[in-house]
């Protein structure tokens, strides 16, 4: 390249670097470069770590990356034709040139990968098959579960007494998932709640039977055919790698001898466990009298998982309902006590009988109690109230007076036109006790003893009318 300079006016030439030789596909070269850069080691060091099976320098992710860029047959043929210096090759080609110098590099990477991945696989697979076998056996051997199933059979026969389903000697396993759907005569209660309540009251040792069966909700999701598949893949990997280990040097073989021996023993043990699990299916079909075409071990575990889950939920719901009922009963009791209390006590209560109200008030006044000022007489509200009360009182008096006069007028009309005195009026003299008695000459004179006595010797039955504070006797 030619570069111009303004200071000296001279032209300087810059030499280009040597052109690198590429023998591989550009896309593949890019992938190789990305993986080798993540290793952060020179190519000779990477080749040395692979040859020594150094699992300290190479972790599992790096080994998986190297296995992705293993040279193929076409790549090896392209590289074998080059005899020039390595410095003239591109990075990907130089890496391959260093890698193919390691004998059985692919086998060494496979052995290191197996050493990294075997323990996690064995831990997961072994735990899964062991829990499945343990849960399957615990269901068949649980005496508490069998007793609960017997109680359900008795309850079912009692409910179906007199019907076609009564007096049964057993029930289908699938019915366990329908118990929580049978409604009770109480709101928010099912047959499951009644069953739990009865067991808690009469046989509390059966209440937590499900805790001894393991984590059925997770175990019921395990498919034993998947276990067999994983074990088959692991066994195939062991056989493949172990059969090629004879090509390695004795030092490398010694590094992987223990891990492959452990893997072989694990596969044999797991295979035996899986076969035992498969045998459980036949035992379940016989124990629960199931149809082999419709039921498998996994289906049975799912049914038991749902039943145990609903049973556990019913325990918690019963507990909450009892707490609510207790709070409701306590609230009703408090309300009943409040209704029985006197009205004054509800508003704040009366002072104790031994205390004197006046003494307490005087003590409060001496202590600086501020008394509330009474409303003045001139207050507009009080004035209106007084006027309204006076108006009501006056109206009542007027009504009483009109009523009194009307009664007197009625008494005069019933006198049949006879005027007892010269003026045509009836003289009324109040008696000593408020009674009125007619006098001998037709006038009304007070009686001596408060009774009404006629003027004549004959007894006259006359009606008595109360007018105000005076009793009138009207002659017939």
Image (spheres, rainbow, N blue to C red):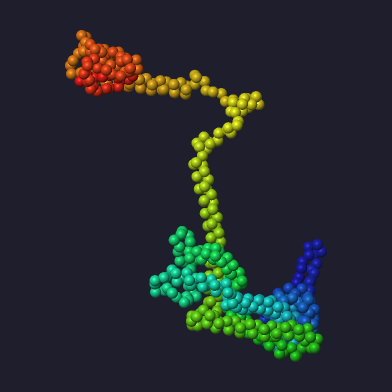
Residue 463 on image: x %, y %: 24, 23
- In the image, what residue occupies the spot 53% across and 76% down? 300
Residue 149 on image: x %, y %: 52, 72
Above-or-below relation of 449 to 98: above
Residue 418 on image: x %, y %: 18, 15
Quadrant position of residue 468: top left
Q: Residue furthest top?
A: 422
**On-image quarter of the N terminus:** bottom right
Nearest the camera: 220 or 463? 463
The number of numbered discs placed on residues in the rendered structure image is 0
- In the image, what residue occupies the spot 37% across and 20% down? 394
Above-or-below relation of 348 to 220: above
- In the image, what residue occupies the spot 67% across and 81% down? 25
Q: Is residue 397 left or right of residue 36?
A: left
Q: Residue furthest front?
A: 457
Q: Residue furthest right?
A: 8
Nearest the camera: 375 or 192? 192
Nearest the camera: 276 or 186? 186
**On-image quarter of the C terminus:** top left
Does residue 2 appear in the picture of this structure?
yes
- In the image, what residue occupies the spot 21% across and 13% down? 420
Residue 413 on image: x %, y %: 21, 19
Above-or-below relation of 131 to 363: below
Does residue 76 appear in the picture of this structure?
no
């Amino acid at each position: 390249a030619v570069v111009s300079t303004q200071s000296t006016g001279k032209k300087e030439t810059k030499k280009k670097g040597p052109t690198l030789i590429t023998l591989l596909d550009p896309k593949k070269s890019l992938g190789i470069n990305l993986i080798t850069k993540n290793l952060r080691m020179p190519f000779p060091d990477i080749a040395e770590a692979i040859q020594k099976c150094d699992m300290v320098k190479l972790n599992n992710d790096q080994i998986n990356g190297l296995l992705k860029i293993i040279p193929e047959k076409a790549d090896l043929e392209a590289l074998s034709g080059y005899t020039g210096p390595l410095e003239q090759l591109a990075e990907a080609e130089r890496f391959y040139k260093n890698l193919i110098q390691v004998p059985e590099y692919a086998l060494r990477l496979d052995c290191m990968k197996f050493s990294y991945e075997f323990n996690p696989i064995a831990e997961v697979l072994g735990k899964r098959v062991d829990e499945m076998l343990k849960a399957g056996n615990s269901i068949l051997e649980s005496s508490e579960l069998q007793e609960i199933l017997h109680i359900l059979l008795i309850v079912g026969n009692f409910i179906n007494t007199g019907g076609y389903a009564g007096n049964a000697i057993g029930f289908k396993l699938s019915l366990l998932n329908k118990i929580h759907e049978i409604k009770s005569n109480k709101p928010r209660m099912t047959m499951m709640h009644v069953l739990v309540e009865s067991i808690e009251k009469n046989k509390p040792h059966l209440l937590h039977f499900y805790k001894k069966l393991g984590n059925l909700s997770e175990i019921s999701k395990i498919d034993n055919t998947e276990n067999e598949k994983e074990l088959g893949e692991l066994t195939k990997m062991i056989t493949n790698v172990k059969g090629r280990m004879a090509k390695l040097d004795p030092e490398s073989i010694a590094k992987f001898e223990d891990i492959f021996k452990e893997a072989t023993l694990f596969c044999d043990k797991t295979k035996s466990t899986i076969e035992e699990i498969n045998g459980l299916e036949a035992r379940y079909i016989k124990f629960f009298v199931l149809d082999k075409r419709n039921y498998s071990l996994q289906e049975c575990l799912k049914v038991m998982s749902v039943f145990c889950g609903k049973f556990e939920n019913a325990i918690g719901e019963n507990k909450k309902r009892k707490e609510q009922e207790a709070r409701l009963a306590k609230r009703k009791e408090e309300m009943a006590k409040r209704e029985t209390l006197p009205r004054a006590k509800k508003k704040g209560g009366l002072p104790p009988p031994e205390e004197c109200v006046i003494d307490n008030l005087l003590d409060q006044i001496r202590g600086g109690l501020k008394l509330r000022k009474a409303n003045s007489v001139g207050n507009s509200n009080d004035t209106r109230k007084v006027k309204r009360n006076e108006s009501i009182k006056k109206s009542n008096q007027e009504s009483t007076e009109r009523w009194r006069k009307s009664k007197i007028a009625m008494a005069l009309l019933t006198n049949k036109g006879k005027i007892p005195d010269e003026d045509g009026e009836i003289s009324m003299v109040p008696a000593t006790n408020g009674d009125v008695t007619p006098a001998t000459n037709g006038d009304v004179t007070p009686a001596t003893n408060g009774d009404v006595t006629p003027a004549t010797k004959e007894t006259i039955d006359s009606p008595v009318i109360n007018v105000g504070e005076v009793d009138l006797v009207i002659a017939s």
